[in-house]
Image (spheres, coloured by chain):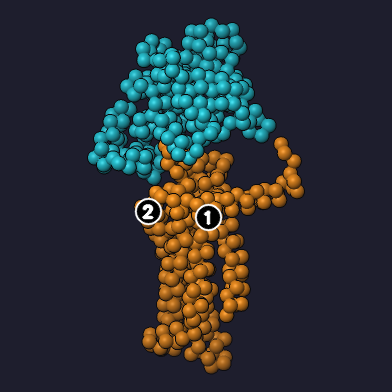
Amino acid sequence: MDKPVITKGIDHFFIDVYNIFRFISRFFRQLFHPPFEFREFMRQCYFVGNKSLSLITLTGFITGLVFTKQSRPSLAEFGATSWLPSLISIAIIRALAPLVTSLICAGKVGSGIGAELASMRVTEQIDAMEVSAINPFKYLVVTRIMATTVCVPLLMAYTGLVGMAGAYLDIHLNEQTSLATFTQNAVTNISFLDLASSLLKATMYGFTIGVVSCYQGYNATQGTQGVGKAANVSVVISMFLIFIEEVVIVQLINAIR
Amino acid sequence: MKGFTPDIDWNETVISIKDLYKSFGDNHVLRGVNLDVHKGENVVVLGRSGTGKSVLIKIIIRLLEQDAGQVNVMGQEVEHLDTEGLRELRLKVGFCFQHGALYDSMTIAENLNFPLERNEPGMTAKERNRRIDLVLEAVGLSHTRDQMPSELSGGQRKRIGIARTLILRPDIMLYDEPTAGLDPITCTEINNLINEVQRRFKTSSIIITHDLTCAKATGDNIAVMKEGKFIVKGTFDEVFRENDELIREFYEYNFTE
């Protein structure tokens, strides 16, 4: 066996980073080459949406509702409860909607993709595609990464709407604010940059979930044990990277702002 | 014992392997393998588990790459094929996996249609359906058309695996442990099917097994592998006249006890 260059753990880390970059470059090379697996892409979009929609609806609504309830006492101290719609809309659109959506998708979709591809790897279904002269990377990986990249921003927009609905319900019940006033106040302080940065973040998070879970599943080893490991590691690494990306993107956006 | 096979062309070699070596780390799996398969011939590779039998056929179809040596399939050096060349090779060489490796999210008809649709885009749906019916009839499982792989028995899965390989009309078949884990009656059915495929579709085959009954029933020639190389080759009678400890153990275990 070759001796480790630094330590075994650090060597593995750098080998993994190198392999992930190769994986991403292979994705971009194959993305623009026909044949395009459009039907499989649509099927994956349906799965991504279908798997997460109910949980996102519930979580988004409760997030908006609870965040409003928690913020009210602080604003009430200054007699500024009329600022609640603005505060909530900024919080939801800038931070909560992209984060909540992507974390739910990392848990539900990422683990599903990781486990599915790993199971296909260990039962030789991926090898079976290769020997049938089918490109499994294009069929399985490109379609899934594209599906998460496209669907997470869409789900994020939906989370934002549902979150705002939760906030409106609480504000309407407590301050008797009309929908028109709530909407006007909520929209006033939202800039194009807020919307664009949220969209960018959600796209990045979707891409991250797709790449991490496909990489873990596609390269799974160790039989059935590897399936569980791939699902678990997909979620953990996706969430970890999402938080790091959040910090970096917020810094960049604030610098632009 | 298998009878005389009239269609073998002893002047035409379809697979030629010379001095093949393959290691995984310190584990030297293949240590100078030489093998010729003639047109229309069934060659059985016999050996204990872990001797490198499956590695050998995975190198032939380039699921694995050799460390040294030459693998020539139908006049082409497998190692030097580009993407398109490899695709063409894989259309000519069918690979049957040990556990069938059926796509478990697809019905049996979809499993068969999947490689056909991608590799023969000019075919109409009607023509594809006709081909699916033909191969299902050939393996005796026409009634499973709309079933899911999880609804089939182990033997049926293997037969569908063979059907999925046959659908692309290969010239060469590679069988990886076709009778492993099956009861004696199903083993006999699979052995008969392998011979039927050879006769009806004029294929040449390599059959990897440690089942002597399968070797006896399907092999025109048998090559016994021990510690990464062939120790004896010939017909069943020739091989089992050899006074080698492994061969004697194999024979006694399968036919005496």
Point 53% across, 55% down: residue:
A211
Tag 2 and tag 1, C-beta contact below 8 Å: no
Q: Is residue B255 above or below residue A72?
A: above
Q: Tell which of A43 and B198 is nearer to you.
A: B198
Would you say residue B178 is visible in this rendering?
no
Point 44% across, 58% down: residue:
A147
Amino acid tagged 1: Val
Point 62% across, 31% down: residue:
B67
Q: Tell which of A156 and B169 is nearer to you.
A: B169
Q: Which chain is tinted orange?
A: A
Total count of labels = 2
- Would you identify the image quadrant in which residue B242 lies? top right
| Between discs 2 and 1, the one toward the N terminus | 2
Label 2 SS: helix
Mark 1, residue position: A211
Q: Chain of mark 1?
A: A
Amino acid tagged 2: Phe
- Would you identify the image quadrant in which residue A158 lies? bottom left
Mark 2, residue position: A38
Chain B colour as displayed: cyan
Q: Tell which of A146 and A30 is nearer to you.
A: A30
Where residue A25 appears, x then y in whole percent?
A: 54, 53
Q: Chain of mark 2?
A: A
Q: Tell which of A89 and B5 is nearer to you.
A: B5
Point 53% across, 19% down: residue:
B35
